[in-house]
Image (cartoon, coloured by chain):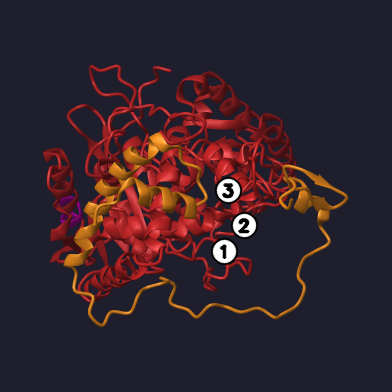
Amino acid sequence: MSDLTNLTLKAAVDGLKAKTFSSQELTQAFLTNIEAANPTLNAYVEITADKALDMAKASDTRIAAGEGGALEGAPLGIKDLFCTEGVQTTAGSNMLRGFVPPYESTVTANLWRDGAVMLGKLNMDEFAMGSSNETSAFGPVVNPWKSKGSNAELTPGGSSGGSASAVAADLCLAATASDTGGSIRQPAAFTGTVGIKPTYGRASRFGMVAFASSLDQAGPITRTVEDAALMLRSMCSFDVKDSTSLDVPTPDWTQSVGQSVKGLRIGVPAEYVVDGMPEEVSKIWAQGIEWLKDAGCEIVHVSLPHTKYALPTYYIVAPAEASSNLARYDGMRFGHRADKATSLTDLYETSRAEGFGAEVKRRLVIGAYVLSAGFYDAYYVRALKVRRRIAEDFDKVWGQVDAILTPSTPSSAFALGDKQIDPVTMYLNDVFTVTANLAGLPGISVPAGLDANGLPLGLQVIGKALDEATVFQVGAALEKAAGGVGRAERWW
Amino acid sequence: MAIDAATVRKVAHLARIKTPDDRLEPLAGELNTIMAWIDQLNEVDVEGVEPMTSNVAQALRLRDDVVTDGDRVEAVLSNAPQSADGFYVVPKVVE
């Protein structure tokens, strides 16, 4: 029955409802895949097999009774950043190893309400800080895709690398992910999957381990645009437990998938041409423009003049917020506590030095630096002002266009270990995705084609705040025109 | 402005991260690379621009000042490195 595992989420939900197969069969098929693949791909940090089979059994009972929610019986993977009641949640950090939340995040609670089944917790960069999954305390995740003629292990991207790898390698139907600067869209692009970051405030951040609160937003990684629409709808809700949650209705975005894009105005921003971008990325972008033209869109050349300042702005704002959010990890109430300490301050300092990895420490030091007396105005306040400039760029463009088309990433997946030497080189991976986070806008990455090495490349559609409908509509048109990029060949 | 080892020591202390002496210079190097890259923000004219602290187009929602949760001592302490009698236990910090 292993073929069940390459179904789309939509097909699986339909098949379950029609009783073509049971959730227990489907869940067992995924558990078998995980058992075989995980020692190589390292996508899961915890496999909750017993819980999954229990949940599947309950789903089968509901389906037999003619009941069940929108995702009834569908086995999903959960990024280890979402607190799951009674199941270890570590955010990829030794600091939280052994932490078992006594509560459930709102996003996962919504998924269980709709009948989804949890297969386990997915690997990620530590506290979501990274673009290659190499900062995880559980080791890097391996991308199921390989370059033609090379055996080198590639990164699935980060920080939702475990989510992307698991979806691409048939280790779950779909996965939750989170995006602070591109952590859903970049790994989706690297693995030939679909990833959407909705408008900031659409999905509750309650129970998500916080990195940078004004940027973090949950979203799904899936195999198709329709699957993304289906799953995002379940994930989103108004939540009184998150003061930034938006009190707006959640539309049925699956209705937007397949709708004609004729007459839509699509912006192509001049500033997204960056130095050193591979020819093939420009080519796929040009191809995307052609596809949308053929589908009846009007292409409008637009300018987002502050684009080049988005990443440096991000690397002030995000570490500053992280230094505040991660102050709670002091060895006192939860997480790692150092054994031997000579004083209270020494206990804090040693616990944090032992618990956090190098990249997290680097960003916490940057955060403390830019917030410290003497630099607060020069760095932090200035970055917040530039952030407004970046958001205003988009506001001006929305008068002229309905959505914006860009590449998702400046390259295809790179080899593990390739970019670890220089942090700035690693940070540049998020050059196309980070503006949407700073402005709070929805953005989707859709697989668009393969490069000369046979590796997936993605196209990104950015939309107006709360206009995921157009983002799905355009994303689905691109997906249809691209005709799929195929699946990674099984070598694991 | 270049960041030196002494600055790193001070900031690492502010961040409450113990940093061995032999890490100070390398960390200073990394931070200088990152901050030099960030310095391009000085090119942007931000005269008269209000800092953007939130990208949600709504006022911060307030709730009624009432108890909504509580009496969950066991749950609260369930992840404490050490606890006793319904309290967190921390090492002795006052001589």
Q: How crowded is mark 1: few (under 14 residues within 10 Å), some or many (20 or more)?
A: many
Q: Position of residue A7 (x, y in %)?
A: 48, 35
Q: Is residue A446 left or right of residue A25?
A: left
Chain designation of label 3? A
Chain identifier matching the red colour in the rendered picture: A
A420 is higher (above) or lower (below) than A297: above
Chain designation of label 1? A
Q: What residue is shown with label 1?
A: A237
Residue at (80, 46) in percent of width and height: B83
Q: What residue is shown with label 2?
A: A106
Is tag 3's residue or tag 1's residue first in the polypeptide sequence?
3
Residue at (37, 73) in percent of width and height: B52
Which image quarter is the N terminus of chain A in?
top right
Q: Are the residues at dot 3 and dot 1 in contact (C-beta closer than 8 Å)?
A: no
Task: For mark 1, give the secondary structure.
Answer: loop
Residue A289, label in figure? none
Q: Are the residues at dot 1 and dot 2 in contact (C-beta closer than 8 Å)?
A: yes
Task: For mark 2, give the secondary structure.
Answer: helix
In three-dimensional space, the C-alpha distance between marks 1 and 2, rounded to whole angstroms, equals 8 Å
Magenta residues, dominant SS class? helix
Q: Nearer the viewer, residue A2 or A104?
A: A104
The tally of labels here is: 3
Q: Where is residue B91 in the image (x, y as percent from the top left)?
A: 73, 45
Q: Where is residue A54 in the image (x, y as percent from the top left)?
A: 73, 35
Q: What stretch is highlighted in magenta?
A: A290-294
Is tag 2's residue or tag 3's residue first in the polypeptide sequence?
3
Residue A82, label in figure? 3
What is the drawing colour of chain B? orange
* Amino acid type assigned to the residue bearing label 3 in the image: Phe
